Image (spheres, helix red, strand yellow):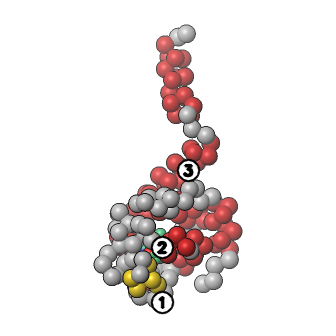
Amino acid sequence: MPKRLTKWLLTAVLLYGCTTAQERKFKQYYLQGQLLYEKHCSNCHQPNGSGLKNLYPPLALSDFLKNNPEKTLCLMRHGLTGEVVVNNITFNQPMPGIPSLTDLEIAEIATYIYNSWGNKRGLVEVQEAERVLRSCIE
Ligand code: HEC
């Protein structure tokens, strides 16, 4: 077999051979979500999801995140006001929404935060985000 072809085949196997389409999609969403998180969310919630004192609630192992998957998608676009309790600590400071985020971007950010810092939920599909985001109460 020509050397170039062997090399190409090896690369192809390394890139695709051991992963399913679903795993590749997960990785793509996760990496894109990380970039978006760092741009739009990490100032407040911190790069490691720890939050900041009693100002910004944590996302790492947050029970709110775990118990409110639909609200979590909605609040990225529409923001959140009023009292919110996260891991037994009460926060009450408005979070501004980011209306410019698309359904896909919200699915990507959700995939990232739901699978980082000890959180584990798997892929949040864009179709799922679309369905939920249509039903948000502003
Ligand atoms: C300007 C600071 C700021 C930015 C930027 C911000 N948040 Fe928030 N976030 C807050 C505050 C403050 C709260 C608590 C809101 C309240 O008290 O009602 C909150 C609450 C939350 C909650 C629910 C509570 C929890 O910790 O589980 C989630 C989830 C969340 N934010 C995710 C995000 C994501 C994802 C982004 C980026 C798309 C983002 N936030 C951007 C400040 C911010």
Are the residues tagged 3 and 2 within 8 Å (C-beta)?
A: no
Pointer 1 residue: 82
Disc 1 packing (10 Å; few <14; some 14–19; many ≥20): few
Residue displayed at 63% across by 60% down? 126
Q: Quadrant of the N terminus?
A: top right
Foreground: disc 2 or disc 1: 2
Residue at the image point whose x is 55% and y is 34% from the top: 18
Q: Is residue 64 visible?
A: yes
Residue lying furthest top in this view? Answer: 1
Relative image position of residue 98 (x, y in whole percent)? 50, 74
**Mark 3 within 8 Å of ligand 1, using the beta carbon:** no
Q: Where does residue 83 sit, x and y in percent of width and height?
A: 46, 89
Cβ of mark 2 under 8 Å from ligand 1: the answer is: yes
Amino acid type at mark 3: Phe
Give the mark, 2 or 1, whose residue is nearer the N terminus: 2
Q: What's under tag 2, amino acid-wise? A: Asp
| Vertical order, 113 against 78 (above or below) | above
Disc 3 element: helix
| Cα–Cα gap, marks 2 and 1 | 17 Å
**Is residue 33 among the parts visible in the rendering?**
no
- From the image, tell me which residue sits under label 2: 63
What residue sits right under mark 3 in the picture? 26
Asked if the residue at label 1 sits under 8 Å from ligand 1, the reply is yes
Q: Nearer the viewer, residue 121 or 27?
A: 121
Q: Which is more N-terminal, label 3 or label 1? A: 3
